[in-house]
Amino acid sequence: MFKFWGSQDQQSQSRPQDGSSQSWYPPSVVSSPSSSRPGTPGSSSSGSFSSHRPSDRPHSPSNVSPTEAAGLIAVLKDKSVDDLRKLLSDKNAYHQFLLSLDQVKIQNNLRDELRKETLQLARENLEKEPRIMELRTQCRIIRTTELAAAQEKLNELERKKEESLKFYSPASLLQRLQEAMNKTEEESEYLHRQFLEREIDLGAFVQKYKKLRTTYHRRALVHLAAKTSTG
């Protein structure tokens, strides 16, 4: 591909490459006098090419696809020897050449687009900052006033709920039923003493005493049944 190198092999072997000592590339790139020469598959006219075997080169990972490599070679093949040497020795020239590649242009365009989108999102977020602060203030007010009142009301309802559950629990019902039985028993005893002391006549005593004892025994049966079922 670069046949013009064949005519200069003798000259390049007799003198060092111009500008190689001033190259800004790492030593691994410009250590060979013929490192600036583009290599071509199947070329055996230059002894320097045959001495620079792949095993002598430092291994480094490469993400360049074959298509991209072919495109890069297509760009380099039309350049003169002086242009290629200038790319190796002049950092600015290499930088300009790098920026002229289509792949680099695509990457730069993508970077610029992403930067613009990021800046746009940042501007939108800054424009929403006052609204965000307003909502935060409202939330703070709700937490300190409305939420506090609602929490207090909820606590009150929870307390009433616990009292109701405790009041209507089986143990509480049995206790109150026992207390009612004891009260009825006391009323019956008081009524009986009144009758013995002739403070009440027989007809009134029988009617009231019968009613109290009926109530007592009814409560006693309910208490016994509830105590048996819960036990």
Image (cartoon, helix red, strand yellow):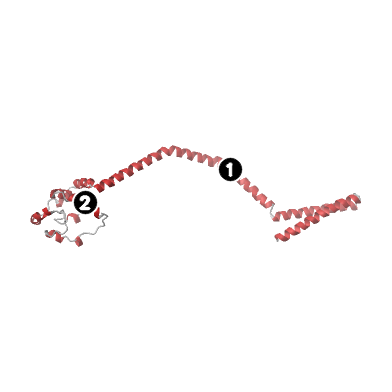
Q: Which residue is mark 2?
A: 72
Type of amino acid at the residue the image marks with label 1: Ala
User: 10 Å neighbourhood of mark 2: few (<14), some, or many (≥20)?
Assistant: some
Is residue 24 something that shows in the picture? no
Give the side of residue 26 with respect to residue 163, left or right. Answer: left
Left or right side of 37 for 128:
right
Report the Cα–Cα distance between label 2 and label 1: 72 Å
Q: Which label lies toward us, 2 or 1?
A: 2
Q: Quadrant of the N terminus?
A: bottom left
Mark 1: few/some/many CA within 10 Å (<14, 14-19, 20+): few
Residue 198 in the image: x percent, y percent? 91, 50
Q: Are marks 2 and 1 in contact (CB under 8 Å)?
A: no
Q: Residue at x 49, y 39 (%)?
A: 137
Quadrant of image for the C terminus: bottom right
Tag of residue 150: 1
Kind of residue at badge 2: Leu
Label 1: which secondary element: helix
For the point 80% across and 56% down, the residue is 217
Residue 177: mark: none
